[in-house]
Amino acid sequence: MVKKKKVSKTKKTNLRSKTISNPKISLVWKNLVFFTLLSLLFFGLYSYATEELYQNLFVLLSIIFGFVGVAFLIALLIFLFLKVMQKR
């Protein structure tokens, strides 16, 4: 009697199976805290500055670092959302 060959199926890689690594979330979290603190620092310096040039410089830097902080906040929320959706 002839033995039948067993056909082994190749496993397809699922793109959703890639997990979001904790180092990415950790890096985004550290950058979020860093730029938020920088924004608050420059806002504080803006409050204590007496010359108009320094006030304009500090408020500009505060706004720029604030926007960068908001960008990292959005990235963190996206990573956390993707992590929650992968567990389902």
Image (spheres, rainbow, N blue to C red):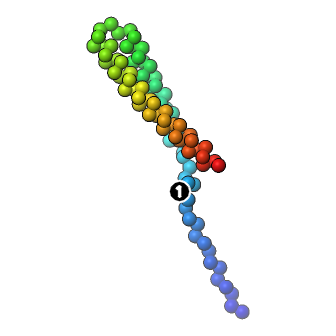
For label 1, the crowd category at 10 Å Cα-Cα, with few meaning under 14, some 14 to 19 and many 20 or more, is: few
Residue 8 shown left or right of residue 62 in the figure? right
Residue 55 position in % (x across, y down): 33, 13
Residue 46 showing in the rendered view: yes
Quarter that holds the N terminus: bottom right
Q: Percent position (x, y) of residue 87?
A: 63, 48
Residue farthest toward the bottom in the current orientation of the protein: 1
Say above or below: 8 vs 61: below
Q: Which of the 4 image quarters holds residue 42?
A: top left
Q: How many numbered marks, from 0 up?
A: 1
**Residue 27 in sight from this viewpoint:** no
Under mark 1, the amino acid is Leu
Between residue 78 and residue 44, name the one nearer to us.
78
Q: Residue at x 35, y 17 (%)?
A: 58
Residue at (62, 78) in percent of width and height: 7
What SS does tag 1 mark? Answer: helix
State the residue at coordinates (68%, 91%). Answer: 2
Seen in the picture, residue 78 relative to 49 is either above or below; the reply is: below
**Image coords of residue 48 (percent x, y):** 38, 9
Residue 41 appears at what percent x and percent y? 42, 18
Residue ID at (56%, 45%): 82
Q: Is residue 88 left or right of residue 73?
A: right
Residue corresponding to mark 1: 15
